[in-house]
Amino acid sequence: MQTYDFIIVGSGSAGSVVAERLSASGRFSVLVLEAGGSDRRFYVQMPLGYGKTFFDPAVNWNYKTEPDPGLAGNVDHWPRGRLLGGSSSINAMVWIRGAREDFDAWAAAGNPGWAFDDLLPVFKALEDNQAGADQWRGVGGPLHITDCSTAVHPLTKRYLAAANQAGLPFNPDFNGAAQEGAGIYQITTKNGRRMSAARAFLRPAMKRKNLRVEINALATRILFEGKRAVGIEYLQNGETKTARAGREVILSGGSINSPQLLQLSGIGPSAILGALGIAVVHANENVGANLQDHVGINYTFRGRLPTLNQILRPWWGKLMVGMQYMLMRSGPLSLSMNNAGGFFRTDPAAARPNMQLYFQAFSTVIPKSGERPILTPDPWPGFSIGLSNCRPSSRGEIMIRSANPRDYPKIVANAFSTEADVAEMLAAVKFLRKIAAMPAMAEIIEEEVLPGPSITSDADIIQDFRKRSGTVYHPVSTCRMGPDATAAVVDPRLRVHGLAGLRVIDASIFPDNITGNTNAAAIMTAWKGAELVLEDQK
């Protein structure tokens, strides 16, 4: 058995950052265990290629939820990255930090050091923003962020104008002074290639002699001596192996895998563990509970002007954009599907936005089996305006269904399970239609394809969004942070309550969800978490 100072489970958005930070000084030996394989794949590196990874079992866990009554009984597809870089290697790359009020609420709940003013220096330190430095943005950090304002599809200007006509002002930077408004998204790319956490943090760190990364290594159990975590058992190439941690074991598996590994190791709800024959090391009802996620829907329109459909669908268009990408690292393939978006309030009396918008200059109404058809859109000029809720009140859970670490856990999302979430989404989609009805958009719209002009009553609109909504891939809070061991999994220093030598550092520790995409906050959490680990080393 080999011994390291630190063992990190997971090389995703969080694990890659923690590995880089803990190995930087050269003082500590670090082992990273990644269940998946390499990120050196063309469709991983090409930004718009993530349509190809959406169902690919070679890089994707391809989780499924239980049938969800709130989604008309549908089983929702939950892609999660299973490779170096984790979900940052297969996501839509949108860089949104979250609102000041989100983090201030974390601190107010008894988590000192997690207020926005504490975290802004962390965000700035890790960023290298192409838009340049100011009081909000950082430059010179490991993670490059691309300013897409000159590269987006021409239709994006019409969307921004229509949003303005509907009452949403232009916002040049969602990560600046305020989030509200419509604008163009910044994305995590550099020179036309995806800037995953692996590319930004892990790969440079892998050149260090004190960092070892094992791929295709599925962590199966945390090893304990009494109440202290001392190592990890893992499967690799059909063989059971163990590694020992002299200082700490750090779980960075994300909101599904981190609670799963805790439960497999005897940390979680005692009734569930006991029923599966798992010896309880430490009972905690919160492990896997408090699941929060953002749920979204697209409204799709047939347009009177060409969209990306006319470029991405025909063979000659594919050839053209392919050549443009290969030779220049530019064009549609170098961008996210979400050119622009925004944040708005369904209730003017609310203190901050509660809904996020997305604009896509193409449409994918006609499905293609086993693939998200981004690279094969509809044969007519189409585009979509989408939205998702930011802080829904619905709560779900993620619990193991057996003691076998290869069995996927049971994901109960409980989408739209509160009346408040349903009312909020109803108001939101009405505002989406208001944007589409503004002159800048209405004059180029032939028809609303989905859900269509016949869907007008509140009952029909609700039925439609229950049928067609789904996750926007932001699950959090299944190992939530908090000072009270009876209501949380980790303390404000991310140490697992009631145990020694064990932390969770990833998006599962969020006390509550944030306003917008969660990847930036997950990376920030990892940077901050690594600082806490280093501070605690004597």
Image (tube, rainbow, N blue to C red):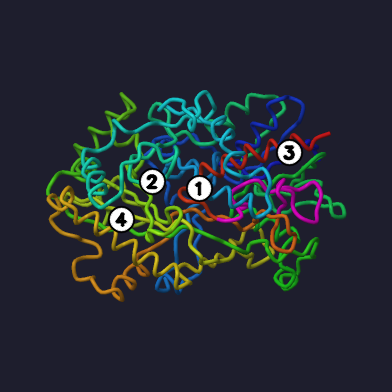
The residue that mark 4 highlights is 368
Name the residue rendered at 67%, 41% in the picture: 529
Numbered disc in front, either 4 or 3? 3
The residue that mark 2 highlights is 52
The residue that mark 1 highlights is 518
Name the amino acid, label 3.
Answer: Val
- Lower sequence index among marks 2 and 4: 2
Numbered disc in front, either 4 or 1? 1
Single out the residue that lies furthest toward the bottom.
Answer: 459
Whether residue 74 appears in magenta in the rendering, the answer is: no
The stretch in magenta equals 490-512
Along the viewing direction, whichever of 296 and 244 lies nearer the viewer: 296
Name the residue rendered at 48%, 62% in the picture: 392
CA distance separating discs 3 and 2: 37 Å
The residue that mark 3 highlights is 533
Q: Secondary structure at mark 4?
A: loop
| Label 2 crowd bin: few (<14), some (14–19), many (20+), radius 10 Å | some
> In which quarter of the view is residue 432 placed?
bottom left
